[in-house]
Image (cartoon, rainbow, N blue to C red):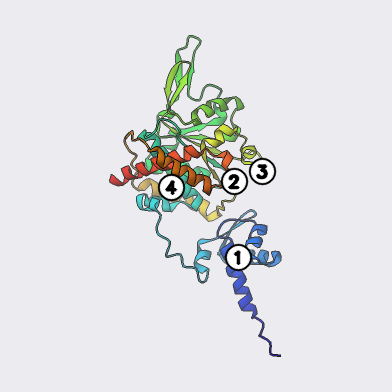
């Protein structure tokens, strides 16, 4: 009986190469990429190392991700049909960000700042949490934002390990007179750095701020918080739920958009190039923030967005998300984009 010839080694190797490159387009460990690709673990490991040597695979610690050169090398995959992002059309500068996660974090921060400044809503404003290990260029997001808004990073930084209870917003003396008022809260945003080292007692002020209202009552006086909070933190624990790893109480988690940099692969070249990228952003045009508009959001549109979010988010995560808050951000962002595009 005539038998079909066995596939050549070249053909087998090529299929493995393509399978692994496709399976690592989102960062993963050896075990995760082995499972996605269907290639044996030992062969997958050899190929990952080989592709890394060829510049087709980026690596950081135990994580692998297909590099830009690797994406172009995937046979039969045409990326030209993907339309340019709407964000890139409005703000082409954000294409300079080192990874898609950095781009998304920057874009969401810009919209959140614009929505808060536009005063489309009084409360339910969104904050950002940039979480993950060191050397992931988390602070690059904040510095890029400063470059686009032409703001000195030092003027908006609040080192949380130095903040004492009841001292984040303002402080009063025994007679009830204001002796200190935070100037940074008058800026477009505040960079709350080193949150993992924050005094536990200071978290009450932080929860008050992250509740999302610009008007905050402090001892029968009103404090206006104009700044959008952007928190930068390392995880306090390596494993566990999101709340356990962050070490924050649930009210803080629910009222923020969280960018998890755990699996974000940042190469040595990206870190070396980051100062030059910041210089390019600083030399470029600034981003225009809108003037207050006070436009109300139709409730029926909000319900549609909330339903879409509930369907899109994994069930195990839905309890950690304030769906109404995301709905407000999305709908307000639509109005904000229309303001920016008219400038």
Residue at position x 46%, y 67% in the image: 78
User: Mark 2 sits on what residue?
Assistant: 315
For the question of whether residue 88 can be seen, the reply is: yes
Q: Measured along the vertical axis of the image, is residue 281 above or below residue 191?
A: below
Q: Of discs 4 and 2, which sits in the foreground?
A: 2
User: Mark 1 sits on what residue?
Assistant: 20
Q: CA distance from mark 3 to mark 4?
A: 31 Å
Q: CA distance from mark 1 to mark 3?
A: 27 Å
For the question of whether residue 146 can be seen, the reply is: no
User: Mark 3 sits on what residue?
Assistant: 238
Residue at position x 44%, y 17% in the image: 221
Return the residue found at the far top.
175
Q: What kind of element bears circle 1? A: helix
Q: Which mark is residue 278?
A: 4
Q: What kind of element bears circle 4? A: helix
Q: CA distance from mark 1 to mark 2?
A: 29 Å
Q: Position of residue 243 (x, y in %)?
A: 62, 38
Q: Is residue 226 left or right of residue 53?
A: left
Q: CA distance from mark 2 to mark 3?
A: 22 Å
């Amino acid at each position: 009986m005539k038998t079909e010839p066995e596939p050549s080694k070249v053909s087998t190797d090529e299929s493995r190469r393509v399978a692994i490159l496709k399976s690592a387009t989102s960062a993963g460990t050896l075990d995760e990429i082995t499972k996605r690709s269907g290639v044996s673990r030992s062969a997958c490991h050899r190929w990952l190392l080989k592709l890394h040597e060829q510049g087709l695979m980026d690596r950081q610690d135990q994580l692998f991700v297909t590099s830009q050169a690797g994406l172009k090398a995937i046979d039969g995959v045409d990326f030209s049909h993907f339309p340019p992002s709407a964000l890139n059309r409005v703000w082409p500068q954000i294409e300079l960000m080192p990874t898609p996660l950095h781009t998304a974090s920057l874009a969401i921060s810009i919209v959140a700042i614009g929505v808060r400044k536009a005063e489309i809503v009084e409360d339910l404003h969104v904050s950002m949490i940039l979480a993950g290990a060191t050397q992931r260029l988390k602070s690059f997001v904040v510095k890029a934002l400063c470059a686009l808004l032409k703001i000195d990073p030092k003027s908006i930084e609040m080192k949380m390990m130095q903040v004492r209870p009841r001292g984040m917003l303002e402080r009063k003396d025994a007679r009830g007179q204001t002796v200190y008022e935070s100037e940074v809260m008058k800026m477009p945003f505040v960079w709350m750095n080193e949150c993992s080292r924050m005094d536990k007692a200071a978290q009450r002020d932080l929860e008050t701020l992250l509740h999302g209202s610009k008007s905050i009552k402090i001892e029968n006086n009103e404090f206006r918080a104009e700044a959008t909070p952007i928190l930068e933190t390392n995880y306090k624990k390596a494993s566990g739920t999101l709340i356990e790893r962050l070490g924050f109480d649930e009210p803080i988690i629910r009222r923020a958009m969280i960018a998890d940099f755990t699996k974000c692969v940042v190469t040595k070249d990206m870190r070396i190039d980051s100062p030059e990228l910041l210089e390019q952003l600083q030399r470029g045009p600034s981003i225009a923030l809108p003037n207050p508009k006070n436009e109300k959001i139709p409730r029926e549109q909000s319900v549609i967005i909330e339903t879409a979010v509930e369907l899109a988010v994994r069930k195990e995560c839905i309890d950690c998300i304030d769906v109404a808050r995301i709905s407000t951000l999305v709908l307000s962002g639509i109005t904000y984009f229309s303001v920016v595009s008219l400038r």
